[in-house]
Amino acid sequence: MNARGVVFVHSSPTAVCPHVEWAISGVLGTKVSLQWATQPAVPGQMRAECSWTGPAGCGGAIAGALRAWPMLRFEVTEEPSPGVDGERFCHVPTLGLWSGRTSANGDIVVAEDRLRALLSEVPASQLPTRMHDLLGSAWDDALEPFRFAGDGAPVTWLHQVG
């Protein structure tokens, strides 16, 4: 089953850019060449984004491959496909990797079992903080300036071969 999504590399040191391309290439099984642009939010850093297609689960595999460079700020999305929930992965150097399931319109979906566990294990005073953790609020807050800095940037389309 083919899925599709987007990789947003919000900030990368110039020296790491080829490694990012190699990591994505390794997951998709095809050579990837991204169009890099300067990242105005962090002088000396680069940014790129690309759309991808591949088997369901590629979004997580791409995020796992990019996680090898802890200095990167990135997001990887995978749209829902028949029988498979969508996902979003966010990485910020100070926060690490976060992932969440997404609905057809891109909203974060928190599963019933996670909510029940949260209600049974967490004191009421900690519920708002833990809910924000489940929703990835800290990652969104940290990445928002980088998203705005990339408005209007070119997008590269990638397709898995074979």
Image (cartoon, helix red, strand yellow):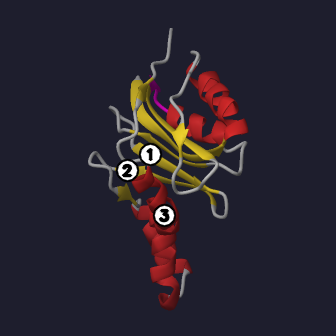
Instruction: Give the foreground label among 3 and 2.
Output: 3
Which residue is labeled 2 in the image? 102
Work out whether mark 1 precedes mark 3 in sequence or the reverse, and give the earlier one.
1
| Prevalent SS, magenta region | strand
Residue 42 coordinates in the image, percent (x, y): 58, 56
Residue 55 coordinates in the image, percent (x, y): 47, 24
In the image, residue 123 sits, relative to residue 117, either above or below, namely: below
Residue 94 coordinates in the image, percent (x, y): 67, 64
Asked which secondary structure carries label 1, the reply is strand
Packing grade of label 3 (10 A; few <14, some 14-19, many >=20) is some
Which residue: 44% across, 42% down? 77
Which residue: 50% across, 11% down? 161
Circle 1/circle 2 CB separation < 8 Å: yes
Nearer to me, 13 or 91: 13
In the image, residue 70 sits, relative to residue 30, either above or below, namely: below
Which residue is labeled 1 in the image? 87
Circle 1/circle 3 CB separation < 8 Å: no
Chain part drawn in magenta: 53-57
Asked which secondary structure carries label 2, the reply is strand
Calculate the distance from the C-alpha at mark 1 to the C-alpha at mark 2.
Answer: 5 Å
Check residue 159 in the rendering and tell me which mark sits there, or answer none: none
Asked which secondary structure carries label 3, the reply is loop
Q: Residue furthest left?
A: 105
Which residue: 47% across, 82% down? 127
Circle 3/circle 2 CB separation < 8 Å: no
Which residue is labeled 3 in the image? 136
Residue 35 coordinates in the image, percent (x, y): 50, 29
Amino acid at the residue labelled 3: Gly
Nearer to me, 88 or 141: 141
